[in-house]
Amino acid sequence: MGTSLTRLAEERRASRLRLISIPQHRSSSPRSFMRMFLDSAKVDEIRFALEHWDIDGVTTNPRHVAATGRSQAAVLEEIAALFAGTDKPVSVEVNPHLTDWREIVAAGEQLARMSDNFVIKVGASDAGFRAVRELSSRGIPTNLTLVFSVAQAWLAARGGATYISPFIGWKEQFGDDGQQLVADVAQMLSMHGYPSQIIAAAVRTGEHVRSAALAGAHCVTAGRDVYADVCNNPYTDYGVKVFGAAWDATPAE
């Protein structure tokens, strides 16, 4: 009986991790491209990003949920409905006030029951690392967030975190090199063969998107405005004017 239960748990874990960590509509190699996640809890923004950009997933946090002016349960239920039947991951965060790993695990399991797409987001801490290890052993995908050092990323990877989220913008806000952090974490994961994937977080500019891509991030998450800005470039605008003038100057016949 014990062996059967263990095998069932392992199969469930493998199934959930395959669903969340490797998008089935693209290459089977998780390192063959950098995925595009939207960092938001606003349903209208998420719906737009799905339809307009075909985003690969979503990351939320308590601040994003609070910005909606609605309860967490109401927001997450609506987001879950948008992703039902897809393989796209949605990171949802447990209560950041929790300091006991058992309580973090219980909260994570409760969130995981809401949707097969939900990836449980846990802050980097002693209790957080222990909780991630337990959640992973139960087949629940995790996102270890608020990562600011390679050591934290290593502990997350060692515990089986599906995703690791180093914060580029926050590092740079206080004078540190956010791009180098992503590059160092990518090197550490590659050197030691950890399957965890990097989500470059706190991405605030097109430069951050560029640096995340070149540093080896597997995914980048940013707000709608950041992606809208990335779509544009003043040199492109200049080129459109030049070619537009040439078009207008061309005889019709």
Image (cartoon, rainbow, N blue to C red):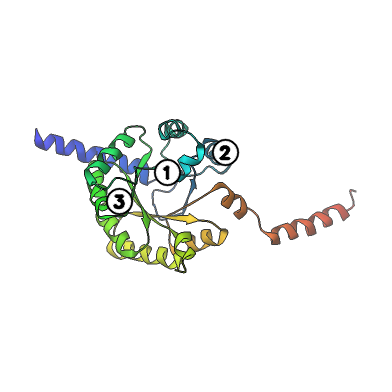
What secondary structure is marked by label 2?
Answer: helix
Position of 144 with respect to 171 (left or right) is left
Which is more N-terminal, label 1 or label 2? 2
Residue indicated by mark 3: 161
What secondary structure is marked by label 1?
Answer: helix
Judge the density around disc 2: few (<14), some (14-19), many (≥20) Cα neighbours within 10 Å.
few
> How far is the residue under mark 3 from the one under mark 1?
20 Å
Position of 165 with respect to 208 (left or right) is left
Which amino acid type is shown beneath numbered disc 3?
Ala
Position of 247 with respect to 33 (left or right) is right
> How far is the residue under mark 3 from the one under mark 2?
29 Å
The numbered mark at residue 48 is: 2
Which amino acid type is shown beneath numbered disc 1?
Pro
The numbered mark at residue 62 is: 1
Judge the density around disc 1: few (<14), some (14-19), many (≥20) Cα neighbours within 10 Å.
some
Q: Where is residue 142 in the image (x, y as percent from the top left)?
A: 32, 46
Residue 137 in sight here: no
Judge the density around disc 3: few (<14), some (14-19), many (≥20) Cα neighbours within 10 Å.
many
Which is more N-terminal, label 1 or label 3? 1
Position of 48 with respect to 250 (left or right) is left
Which amino acid type is shown beneath numbered disc 2?
Phe
What secondary structure is marked by label 3?
Answer: loop
